[in-house]
Image (cartoon, rainbow, N blue to C red):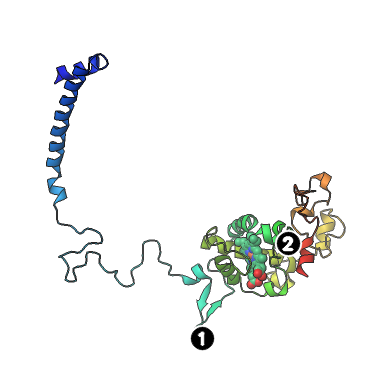
Amino acid sequence: MRKQLSAFSFQLSASGAAWRVARGGFAVAGLAALLAVAGCRQDMQNQPKIRSQRGSEAFADHRGARPQVANTVARGQLHEDSYFYTGVVQAADGYREEKNEMPFPVTLDVLKRGQERFNIYCSPCHSRVGNGLGEIVQRGYKPAANYHDQVRLSQPISHYFYVMTHGYGAMPDYSAQLTPVDRWAVAAYIRALQLSQAAKLDDVPSGVPVRSLKEIAQEQHLPEGFAEPWTLPPTAVQALPNDVKQGNPALAPTGPADTKITIPQSKPAIKAAK
Ligand code: HEC
């Protein structure tokens, strides 16, 4: 055999006869290998076992696939705290009810995480200040909700969680992008945004000294009018001077590539809302 193999390697191109001899050698070797492998299979191949989707004599009902045990919960899917996962509780009348309650304590870290996620996923439509006039809305999308209006201010915090989980009207849901804990963090941040515009003296814990904005503005040499009520800019970035030459990123492009398309230049969302 060794002789045949060497004949194969050295004379393949030169002699057809040598090639035929070598081929015979390979066939014999292959057959031997096959027989050897087949011999190994015995034990594992023939053991008693249930094949998927086939019957079995082992059970009285002759079904190989066993029915699921009632109330079994898959690993990692035990959602015991249903308020945390759904944002609603079952009310006495059988209806779902939202609550003005966070399922975990709100720390500064939670708010920072909420702010980060909000700026990524919500600000394109709701704007960074939450007035509903984000960039996408300025380019024609249905005006997103203004978190500072009376309706939104009076909604319970879990409503925001619910809206992120299921979407709302023209708004898509964000359950794929935001985990439950992130949705709660964003909801908490919406409350912080609202508080930034509508805080009252009662919101301050008793005993904590309150100073007027006017005092602070003077002390920090902030521009006059800082302590007056602000008109919220359409987006946080547009609080910059409204000048294209300054490279204001919030402005629409000066001209569309296709002249038949008009890109609104300023605050069209307010017009669209009427
Ligand atoms: C693609 C644009 C868009 C994005 C992004 C978006 N929203 Fe909205 N959102 C809307 C629109 C539009 C409405 C008003 C829906 C309607 O009235 O049909 C709305 C409404 C809402 C409301 C008010 C619901 C009510 O009861 O009035 C809340 C709260 C809200 N969005 C939260 C969020 C949060 C939180 C995010 C980020 C996770 C987000 N939205 C991202 C477009 C958007």
Determine if residue 157 is in view.
yes
At label 1, counting other C-alpha atoms closer than 10 Å, the crowd grade (few under 14, some 14-19, many 20 or more) is few
Instruction: Locate ligand 1 by image quadrant.
Output: bottom right
Residue 136 x %, y %? 70, 58
The answer to which quarter of the image holds residue 202 is bottom right
Residue 1 x %, y %? 13, 21
Determine if residue 191 is in view.
no
Front: mark 1 or 2: 2
The answer to which quarter of the image holds residue 13 is top left
Label 2: which residue? Answer: 133
> Is the CB of mark 2 within 8 Å of ligand 1?
no
Question: What element does badge 1 sit on?
Answer: loop
The answer to which quarter of the image holds residue 212 is bottom right
Residue at the right extreme of this rendering = 224
Horizontally, residue 158 falls left or right of residue 66, namely right
Judge by depth and name the residue closer to the eye, 195 or 25: 25
Residue 167 x %, y %? 58, 67
Residue at image x 50%, y 71%?
83
Vertical arrangement, residue 46 with respect to residue 132, above or below: above
Label 1: which residue? Answer: 93
Judge by depth and name the residue closer to the eye, 128 or 173: 173
Judge by depth and name the residue closer to the eye, 216 or 223: 223
Residue at image x 83%, y 52%?
242
**Residue kind at label 2, given as amino acid type:** Leu
